[in-house]
Image (cartoon, rainbow, N blue to C red):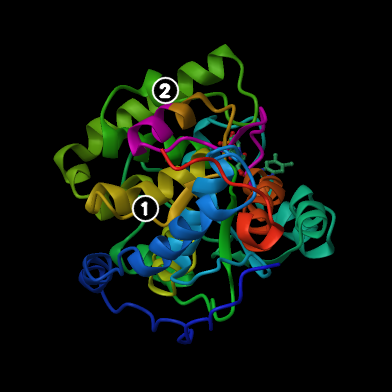
Amino acid sequence: MSVSAAASPARSGPLPPAASLDEIRALVRGAPGPDTDARARTEAREPTLTKPAGSLGRLEELACWLATWQGRHPPALDRIRCVVFAGNHGVATRGVSVYPPEVTHQMVANFQAGGAAVNQLCRANGADLAVIPLDLDRPTAPFDEAPAMTEAEVLEALNAGLTLDLSGVDALIVGEMGIGNTTAAAALSQALFGGTAVDWVGRGTGLDDNGLARKRAVVSAAIARHGDALRDPLEALRRVGGRELAAMAGGALAARHARVPVFMDGFICSAALAVWQAMDSHGLDHCLAAHVSMEPGHQRLLAALGKRPLMTLDMRLGEGSGALTCLGLLRSAVACHVGMATFAEAGVTDKDPA
Ligand SMILES: O=C(O)c1ccc[n+]([C@@H]2O[C@H](COP(=O)([O-])O)[C@@H](O)[C@H]2O)c1
Ligand SMILES: Cc1cc2nc[nH]c2cc1C
């Protein structure tokens, strides 16, 4: 009874690395928009399926959104790629995390050995995993004192995501690991959306009240230190972001160009990708908020981005874990849209047209 499959559009290979931040800006300006034909075909099929109109709630919207941003009808979620980027942060020396920076390296080894949450969640939810450590022996500069990265460094990190090969991939999850990176996410969120450190800074991996006060002071000092330079979103990413944040942003931009929807994970992932929406109000239209994390800044950030999370699971792990956990829901949306019989096929009487 399933809808007949339309030929998938040919996927081009990976994008070449950008040679400058201006080339990144040009990729944002030239990003493809929604596929209105695929959207129209999904919207036309949905009311013919054997259920009361609207009764599958958000699953109906999800099927339509997936088709729109995959650029094909019917949508598919057979091949999900999760890429976890890891980076180290100079700001981690400021007492802003309860874990020491060497945990980043140690967790990368754990990912590679298959022992982390992300490994189990990829297996349980049918996603493949790539782990990309980014210069772990070269932490970024402490950004309350100096820009976290040089232009060459942020470009290299952006390119780690931009050059991902997404051929044949139906959706992308970008995850991260980096001790200290909730401080970077808070500073970047404040740079992009305003407010105060109290609005954006949370306890991360578990700070006590003194630690929280210290972390707020570090973020406030960074915002004051960089001042008006933070008005340019890419410059904000360079000054108060981190390598794994830049790489996740690069991955989401590559996905837009490859017509691959992105399922956003927690606070750090959302802050990194927010750079594209700060540059272009439609820059994250191909990205969906899978869950809202316990880090309080995440709720505020999703509100600023106009995104309603699919689930609230009280998670605050990172690694792409929240997005991976939502895959069953997304696959449910596709399965119903693709596999259900229509009223005509099943001989079920439809409601009277109003
Ligand atoms: O995804 C989230 O919302 C999230 C919230 C709190 C912590 N984390 C993870 O914890 C690490 C950062 O925490 P912290 O306290 O060192 O800044 C980093 O590796 C993240 O993946 C992740
Ligand atoms: C152990 C550990 C695992 C993580 N995974 C993502 N962030 C993390 C932070 C810590 C501390």
x and y percent of residue 220 in the render? Answer: 32, 26
User: What residue is at 55 percent from the left and 68 percent from the top?
Assistant: 74
Closer-to-camera residue (267/182): 267
Q: What's drawn in magenta, residue-wise?
A: 300-318
Residue sitting at x 83%, y 60% = 114
| Residue located at (61% from left, 67% from top) | 76
Q: Are marks 1 and 2 in contact (CB under 8 Å)?
A: no
Image coordinates of residue 11 in percent, x first then y, are 48, 84
Mark 1 Cα-neighbour bin, 10 Å: few <14, some 14–19, many ≥20? many
As drawn, the label of residue 284 is 1
Q: Is residue 326 left or right of residue 32?
A: right
Determine crowd level at label 2: few under 14, some 14-19, many 20+ residues with C-alpha closer than 10 A: many
The quadrant where ligand 1 appears is top right
The type of residue carrying mark 2 is Arg
Q: Is residue 158 above or below residue 143?
A: below
Q: Nearer the viewer, residue 196 or 320?
A: 320
The answer to whether residue 248 is visible is no
Question: What element does badge 1 sit on?
Answer: loop
> Residue under circle 2?
216
Q: Is residue 144 above or below residue 69?
A: above
Indicate the quadrant containing the N terminus: top left, top right, bottom left or bottom right: bottom right
Q: Nearer the viewer, residue 325 or 208?
A: 325
Q: Is residue 89 left or right of residue 145?
A: right
- The answer to whether any part of residue 323 appears in the image is yes
> Where is residue 95 drawn, in percent x and y?
54, 29
Q: Which mark is residue 103?
A: none
